[in-house]
């Protein structure tokens, strides 16, 4: 499921831009799971079909801001390289698209966010948890001290990802996010460099 995470950074705007540029070309792996830089996403088999299955899945629609209905123009836009402040990887397992992870760095506010989604066929296998760990480790390695995951309280799958990735529940924000025309409570999880 796609969730937003906040990464607090202490460095300057130029550092954030350099971080984006550097991470955009890094392939991350922990064995049989690969986070492929988005510039190479067209190397993935059955890409369009798996993305469409992901974005039209009822849980994706319920818990994310993915457009609904999802048109061919939305797909074409998603397949392009993201804007300069976003680093996106494709989760690849068994040479197949299993989802995506994004790192978004907001330069003026010295924060970044992580968003993620899983293809329906890849859910329940621990792949997103492993991907979150890889991106979090890379963020910490680049000097980001704290990662914050924000997820709808009733999104039990995404909450489980945060907990299995060793994030600690910090607080619940009542009506913390508007999603599909209604406000929802948000669970906020933290991961620090010392964890």
Image: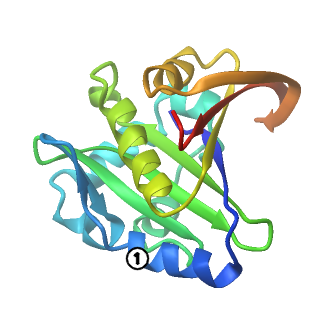
Q: Is residue 63 above or below residue 137?
A: above
Front residue of 65 and 69: 65
Which residue lies at the image location 37% right of the left edge and 34% below the top edge?
Answer: 128
Q: Can residue 134 be seen in this view?
A: yes
Tell me: 67 left or right of 95: right
Counting from the top left corner in percent of width and height, residue 74 is at 52, 60
Q: Is residue 26 above or below residue 187?
A: below
Using the rendered image of the protein, determine whether residue 67 is visible from the camera's viewpoint: no
Q: How crowded is mark 1: few (under 14 residues within 10 Å), some or many (20 or more)?
A: few
Q: Tell me the residue at 53%/44% (across/down).
A: 193
In which image quadrant can residue 83 be found? bottom right
From the viewer's perspective, is 76 left or right of 38? Answer: right
**Residue 20 percent location from the top left of the image:** 50, 73
Residue found at the very far front of the displayed protein: 194
Q: Is residue 13 left or right of residue 96?
A: right
Q: Nearer the viewer, residue 146 or 65?
A: 146
Q: How many marks?
A: 1
Check disc 1 and report the residue beneath it: 22
Q: What element carries label 1?
A: helix
Q: Residue at 51%, 20% (x, y): give it.
A: 163
| Quadrant of the image occupied by residue 171 | top right
Q: Work out whether residue 28 or residue 124 is closer to the camera in this orientation and state it.
A: 28
């Amino acid at each position: 499921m796609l969730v937003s995470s906040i990464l607090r950074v202490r460095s300057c705007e130029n550092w954030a831009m350099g971080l984006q540029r550097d991470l955009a070309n890094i392939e991350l792996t922990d064995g049989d799971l690969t986070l492929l830089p988005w510039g190479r996403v067209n190397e993935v088999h059955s890409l369009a079909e798996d993305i469409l299955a992901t974005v039209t899945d009822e849980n994706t629609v319920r818990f994310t801001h993915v457009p609904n209905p999802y048109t061919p123009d939305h797909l074409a836009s998603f397949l392009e390289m993201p804007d300069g402040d976003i680093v996106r990887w494709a989760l690849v397992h068994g040479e197949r698209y299993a989802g995506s992870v994004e790192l978004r760095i907001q330069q003026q506010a010295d924060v970044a966010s992580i968003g993620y989604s899983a293809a329906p066929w890849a859910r329940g296998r621990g792949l997103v948890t492993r991907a979150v760990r890889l991106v979090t480790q890379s963020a910490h390695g680049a000097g980001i001290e704290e990662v914050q995951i924000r997820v709808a309280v009733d999104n039990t799958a995404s909450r489980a990802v945060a907990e299995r990735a060793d994030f600690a529940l910090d607080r619940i924000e009542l009506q913390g996010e508007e999603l599909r025309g209604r406000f929802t409570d948000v669970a906020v999880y933290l991961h620090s460099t010392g964890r």
